[in-house]
Image (cartoon, coloured by chain):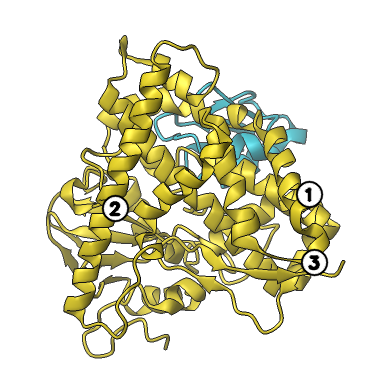
Chain colours: A cyan, B yellow
Amino acid sequence: MRVRLDEAKCVGHGRCYVLGPDVYEEDDAGHCVVRVSDVPRELEDQARAGEQNCPEGALEIEE
Amino acid sequence: MSGVIDEKTGEILLFHPEVARCPQPVYAELRSKCPVGRAQITASPVVSRFEDVVWALRHPEIFSSEMGEQMKLGNPRPMIPQQIDPPNQTRYRRLLDPLFSRKRMLELTPAVRRHANQLIDAFAGAGRCEFDEAFAIPLPCTAFLALFGLPASDLPTFLEMKDGIIRPHKFLDPPKDASLAEMAAHIDLQNAHRKKTADRMFTYFEEEIEKNASAHRDDLLGALLEAEMDGEKLTREELLDICFLLLIAGLDTVTATLGCNIAYLAANPEQRRRIVDQPKLIPGAVEELLRWETPVTAVPRIAKCDTTLRDFEIKKGEVVTFLIGAANTDDDHFKRAQDVDFERERNIHLAFGAGPHRCLGSHLARMELQVAMEEWHRRIPDYRIQAGETPMFSPGIREVMYLPLEWDV
């Protein structure tokens, strides 16, 4: 699984790094940074939770 | 039929008491019968479907926040950053977002937790309280004063100022059985009260800025005084316009959300039992109740050009009301939208807006709501509305202005 962030869409809701803290983290402004873009199996649920709850549709997952 | 859509004219009565008391069925009626309609009195187009609302929030070039004279809260210039659009707004958000990041807000958690317990200490043994006055109002307002670095003793002044602007009806009794003309005159009176209060608030902040101009402070006011944008410090006017917004937006909304949450949980004991038994459900419950109750029911935008939305013609310059609450309960967007599910897997709600104007204080609000819900239910797990009493909701921002609770001691 790979996860991709469209930085232009992110406005800092912060749902991703709250729901998937091992996959996503926040920068100083509270915007998303992808920690692991190649997602290991044990973190797939976190990656998906973040992607599914982004109000801006800024995250994309490829399986 | 809720009576919120006028049967003769088709106009929407947005300030109908039912919209504040029990809005979800009203929203369903609006989404299905008139997804874009016209409000009574203001004639503002009202938009209620999720798809339309989220699109508008992401397109400030068409639905702008630069309200000009249309948004009369008594401020002489636009509030920063809420009433300006990108790209200018983006510069301010770059400066402000780090000051309200989740990381920073989490640092305030212990103080908020302590204060929540102090408030509860005062009434837990009595077995009853009026929730708004005793808890929902002082908790976020005191947190805000601490964040800003202002003395807690200024709380009464602050409450009077924010209510004077957001809730002038607390100070001015509306006329009974008024005609539309009388209601319009009353709205003018409210606006005059807003202006007077806004002047007072500007004077207050101006004095604070003056006093601290050369001080180095480890708080929000200090950070604003030292902040630079494109190599320049903020001007006096910019500082004031930011402070004004923070006061308007930072106090009332969490108060209203706490009231809506507790009113819901008092009326739904099986749901309350679930979060008492499993406090780990609280973050999900906070999200779901933000969606379901949506205390900030609507946001205004101004149309920058003539545009058509679902065959409804919106004219350039019209103020359009986007019903966040209706969007948040839209069956076309949420699975089982009418169920309140604290473990909802996908919960993309618009309680904090979307697009460039995403609520600056969302991380502060979420932290305060979670801490308040945790401490309240740890200390007072079993509560109910006092026998024979009915909670009272205010229109607009749905504050539960009267929420009498009781519990066994």
Give me the C-alpha separation between circle 3 and circle 1: 26 Å
Residue drawn 47% across the image and 67% down it: B330
Q: Which residue is disc 1 drawn over?
A: B280
x and y, in percent, of residue B122 in the image: 75, 53
User: Can the viewer see residue B46 in this picture?
Assistant: yes
> Is B117 placed left or right of B105 in the picture?
right
Residue B405 in the figure: left or right of residue B346: right
Q: Are discs 3 and 1 located on one and the same chain?
A: yes
Counting from the top left corner in percent of width and height, residue B378 is at 82, 53
Is the same chain shared between marks 2 and 1? yes
Determine the CA span between mark 2 and mark 3. Answer: 37 Å
Q: Which residue is mark 3?
A: B127
Amino acid type assigned to the residue bearing label 2 in the image = Arg
Residue B358 seen in this snapshot: no
Label 2 to label 1, Cα distance in Å? 42 Å
Residue pictured at 39% horizontal, 59% vertical? B167
| B112 or B311, nearer to the observer | B112
Q: Amino acid at mark 1?
A: Lys
Residue in the image at 41% along x and 79% along y: B29
Circle 2 or circle 1, nearest the eye = 2
B317 w.r.t. B400: above or below: above
Mark 3 closeness class: few <14, some 14–19, many ≥20 residues within 10 Å? few
Q: Secondary structure at mark 3?
A: loop
Per the image, the residue denoted by label 2 is B194
Pick the quarter of the image with the N terminus of chain B: bottom left
Q: State which chain disc 1 sits on.
A: B
Quadrant position of residue A47 = top right
